[in-house]
Amino acid sequence: MKDFLNLHRVIYALLAMMAICPTHASQPLTGIVQVAAGDSHACALTATGTVLCWGNNNYGQLGDGSTTNRQLAEPVHGIGQATAIAVGYRHSCAIDAGRVKCWGFNDSGQLGDVGVGQSTLPLTVPGITSASAVATSFGHTCALVGSAVKCWGANNVGQIGNGSTSTVVATPFTTIASGATAIAAAHVQTCAIVGGGAVQCWGFNGNGQLGTNNKDTALTPTGIIPSGTTAIAMGMFHTCAIVAGTLHCWGSNGSGRLGVGDQTERLTPTPVTASGITAVAAGSYHTCALIGGATQCWGNNYSGELGTGDIVNRLSPAATLIGAATAVTTGNFYSCALVVGGGVKCWGDNLNGALGNGVTSVQSAHVVAVPASANATTASHSNDHGCAVVNGAAKCWGVNTNGQLGDGSTASRTTPVGVSGLSSGSRRWLRACGTAAPWSVVLPGAGVTTAGDSLATV
């Protein structure tokens, strides 16, 4: 009993010191293989299978057991064998040893459990044991399980694909039984690539974004493209897919975001005049693609998000100023690309430093290089902040009002800053303060005892 009480005194003392001590300088986040940016929070997947998140945490979307916003990357509790992550509007998910685990806002059962309004810790979605991909959106979630697509959560406009518009689907519904190879989810609609490269879509269709030749909500998966699809991207009100090397787009066409030479919406997939397309990204009001190894963009260009050196909208693919690229991603009113050699270049709206070029000009019609971006391998962008993996380290820039950049502050950044937190995603330094004497403590499960600083495995 004495040892038990002493252990509790140590724990309480440690918690008190953590509460009153200034934050200890943290090592840069390294060993990152994937980074995903949500509305105002972000998460990273490490090579060892752990997940770390930072930023807004008002609904527990960081998964650290609290609702405290975090300016530094914090480990998601209970996940150690993750292979993929997805970040939604106010919730996050990971595939952990084949199981889907989700946390955060749960107003529509998007976590796979309607018994709670939110969860600050990962909840295991029932009935799924061999998932390979997960897609998150505003209020629903889907997973690729073997070759089946399973969805759950909000279903007010049929985004689950179960044949109804029930408000909430509490447990995973098998939307597609077999043959699926990829999934994508947007605001309140979903698409999947199935056997032979066919595309099936379901959910909201008010702008023809499902490609069904009407504007009727689709309550079940509806065939759009019969074969040959290798990639699909969903914007808020339009969709694009690469089919046998040719890009097809459909849905809302305001500002020419479909790239078909006019502004008339299309209710079925319509070919975009371009060849050699290998990747596509759909923003809210514009689209970008890799065409012949170079980035071309079209649609709205009010903030220079097309990277053409001006602010003129384009009705068809237009060459950007960045040269050869290996990947492209789109935010709300800006875009970024990974260029040959591993660098990152961005263009468009920069009011909050989303371009990472050191200034906050209201708009930038010219492409800018993101400093210190050599050897970047992946990039992800939300409405007003971006992140990239550079030499295995996570770097972010842009709006930081909720600490979503993970640099230990709430100051927006005009250049990329290293995400601070856990070195290699597994350890954190804890320091005693207010005393010059060395101290020692054993934390349960830490496996280390030291004097002075204590290194605890978390």
Image (cartoon, rainbow, N blue to C red):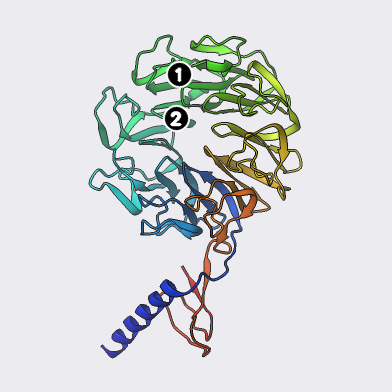
Coordinates of residue 380 in the picture (x, y in percent):
57, 41
Dot 1: within a 10 Å radius of its alpha carbon, few (fewer than 14), some, or many (20 or more) residues? many
Coordinates of residue 212 in the picture (x, y in percent):
42, 13
Query: Of the residues under marks 2 and 1, which one precedes in the sequence?
Result: 2
Disc 1 designates what residue?
209
Q: In the picture provided, is 74 more to the left or to the right than 119?
A: right
Q: In the picture provided, is 206 more to the left or to the right than 235?
A: left
- Residue at x 56% of width, y 47% of height: 34
Q: Please identify the quadrant where the N terminus is shown.
A: bottom left
Identify which amino acid the numbered label 1 is placed on.
Gln
Q: In the picture provided, is 13 more to the left or to the right than 32?
A: left
- Residue at x 48% of width, y 46% of height: 85
- Residue at x 31% of width, y 88% of height: 3
Residue 249 shows up from this direction: no
Coordinates of residue 320 in the picture (x, y in percent):
72, 26
Label count reads 2
Disc 2 designates what residue?
186
Alpha-carbon distance for marks 2 and 1?
10 Å
Give the quarter of the image for residue 342.
top right
Position of 456 relative to 144 (above/below): below
Coordinates of residue 6 in the picture (x, y in percent):
33, 87
Residue 242 shows up from this direction: yes
Dot 2: within a 10 Å radius of its alpha carbon, few (fewer than 14), some, or many (20 or more) residues? many
Of residue 426 and residue 40, the one placed in the foreground of this image is 40
Identify which amino acid the numbered label 2 is placed on.
Ala
Q: Secondary structure at mark 2?
A: loop
Looking at the image, do the residues carrying marks 2 and 1 touch, with CB atoms under 8 Å apart? Answer: yes
Position of 455 relative to 341 (above/below): below
Q: Secondary structure at mark 1?
A: loop
Position of 7 relative to 403 (above/below): below
